[in-house]
Image: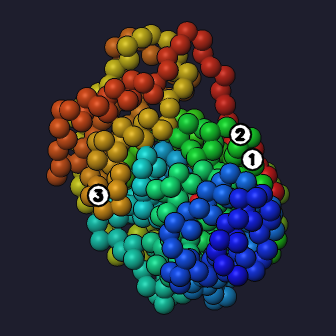
Amino acid sequence: MNMIEVITAKRDKLSLTDEQIEFFVEGVTNGTIPDYQISALLMAIVLNGMDEREMTTLTLEMAKSGTQMDLSYMDGIPVDKHSTGGVGDKITPILLPLIATFGVETVKLSGRGLGFTGGTVDKFESIEGFNVEVDSKDFPELVKKTGMVISGQTPDLAPADKILYSLRDVTATVDSIPLIASSIMSKKIAGGAKAIVLDVTCGSGAFMKDIKMAEDLAKAMIKIGNLAGRKTIAVITDMDQPLGRFCGNILEMQEVVNTVTGKGEEDVIEVVTELAFHLIKLAGKDAGMSDEVLRAEIRARLSDGSCFEKYTELIKSQGGKVLASGAPVYVDKPFSCMNVCSPDSGYVQSVRADLIGKASVILGAGRLRKTDAIDYGAGIGFYVKVGDRVERGDALCALYHGEKSDVSEDKLFDAMELILEAYQIGPEKPEKKSSILSVIS
Ligand code: URA
């Protein structure tokens, strides 16, 4: 077999055989296929797609390209969640301790932020002393202690995906359902999950801009999961405005503490409750509760102190510093340096999350290149969200940088311009929309 034959087959809209896909992934992993041939095949897949069998084979081959984690030491069915990314997405730090209060154990391998979406690893790193590079041999002990562990992805987890993803990033081949679905699912499968809950974000701040695209991606991942023997459920969530009240690392982690102490924003609570509900059920830890009772119990644990207690346990178990109150100590302090005010009176119609994400990166909260340093205290706080009334001159949001950093006037101005473009103000009060757009199983 040679690579030209494989590229030709996909160029001519044929289905690749399992052997051809195996040959491709092996060659990518071993470095025997040059980047130009890999890129040519990626582009042919973007243009001509893949069927369910091809996607599943690609996923399983990528999962097999490195270490496959064995989570058999865990109590119950190992579950995992994945979000396709968004702005202000602070779900994981709330969700892990929340489901741990029901006895659901998790090993969560997360990434850093790149571009306008934030990364869970960066958020945890904003806590003083918190170790995000846990050696996988320490996972069982940490899981036994607190029921959870959070760590950056190790280089040997689905290495073929790492190589493919970095090429996709520079060859305009990221936006492809087969490639996104196989990339995400390969890491979940290599991570050892037997059941998976996917948070497929949809809207201006997500990969998938409309519900049809989000559902197509969700269905592809569910098909792959099921063909690979993993029960998979997808929750399509709204990312047509940033999630919650803040974006930026420390700001979001402070919002996490608010949420696990019963003072969360409804959109965050809605998403976290829905994901927790499915994870608890898939893990078999619902203790026979009816769906209604389980949902109420999940919400109750966000305000009765049990989730906060677990959250503090998680922080301490990975070396994070906490105050006597149980709240974490952060590496910096967000400083509110400027408000952006509304140019018009009316109701907030939409807040383009992609532009808010870009403004937040300009302030220093995210990176454009993998090697960029970040200002953990930087970000944006939203005074008003979709449906709120504002008068001309009212503050829409506050811009922050960390006390240990600074941000130039030019950057503040650029961020302000993006924010003014992001906020659409109109005369009619928009209809209230749920953060859960649909659930596919
Ligand atoms: N996240 C991933 O892990 N892979 C993709 O291709 C897109 C989003």
Label 1: which secondary element: helix
Instruction: Check whether the beta carbons of the residues at disc 2 and disc 1 lie within 8 A of each other.
Output: yes
Question: Residue 165's spot in the image, x, y percent?
Answer: 52, 64
**Residue 49 location (% of width, % of height):** 73, 56
Q: Which mark is residue 416?
A: none
Label whose residue precedes the other's in the sequence (3 or 2): 2
For badge 3, the amino acid type reads Asp
SS of the residue under disc 2: helix
Q: Label 3 belongs to which residue? A: 372
Identify the residue position indicated by label 2 in the image: 211
* Cα gap from disc 3 to disc 2, whole angstroms: 33 Å
Closer-to-camera residue (135/270):
135
The answer to whether residue 349 is above or below residue 180 is above
Mark sitting earlier along the chain (1/3): 1
Q: Nearer the viewer, residue 57 or 4?
A: 4
User: Badges 3 and 2: C-beta atoms under 8 Å apart?
Assistant: no
Give the residue type at disc 2: Ile
- Picture quarter containing residue 356? top left
Query: Ligand 1 quadrant?
Result: bottom right
* Residue at the spot 25% in from the left edge and 33% down from the top edge: 412
Q: Which residue is mark 1?
A: 215
Give me the residue at 77% from left, 69% from top: 16
The secondary structure type at the circle numbered 3 is: loop
Residue 436 as seen in the image, left or right of residue 243: right
Q: Quadrant of the C terminus?
A: bottom right
